[in-house]
Image (cartoon, grey):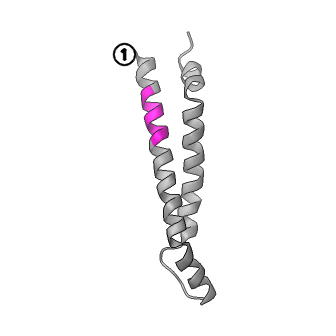
Amino acid sequence: MTARDIFGLILRLLAVWLFVWGCWNLIAALFYLPATIQAFISQSTFAYSSLRYGIYGAPATVFGILVLRFADPIVRFTYRS
């Protein structure tokens, strides 16, 4: 394996990890959404706000998909022949 292959593999693994982590956060945001709405209606503080999970989950999921989609152009840009 060349350095280019290893870089491509690490890049794809990072993208998959970001996608999975982002999806996990989005699922957690949906899980805590009813409790967050109930806390908002009753005007109390709630420790597990679904907003913070969504704030981190959505960009991580999108960025993971984009890196997976454009992994080959990124590797070609990094290791020019």
Return the x and y of residue 63 as percentages of the image width and height: 58, 43
Whether 61 is drawn above or below 81: the answer is below
Q: Residue at x 57, y 14 (%)?
A: 80
x, y percent for residue 60: 55, 49
- Residue at the extreme top: 81
Residue type indicated by callout 1: Met
The answer to which image quadrant residue 50 occupies is bottom right
Q: With respect to residue 30, does 1 lie above or below?
A: above
What residue range appears in magenta?
Answer: 9-16
Residue at x-position 43% and y-position 35%:
13
Which residue is painted at 50% across and 61% down in the image? 27
Give 27 or 14, whichever is nearer the viewer.
Answer: 27
- Which secondary structure type mostly characterizes the magenta part of the structure? helix
Q: Quadrant of the N terminus?
A: top left
Label 1: few (<14), some (14–19) or many (≥20) C-alpha neighbours in 10 Å = few
In the picture of the structure, the residue carrying the numbered disc 1 is 1
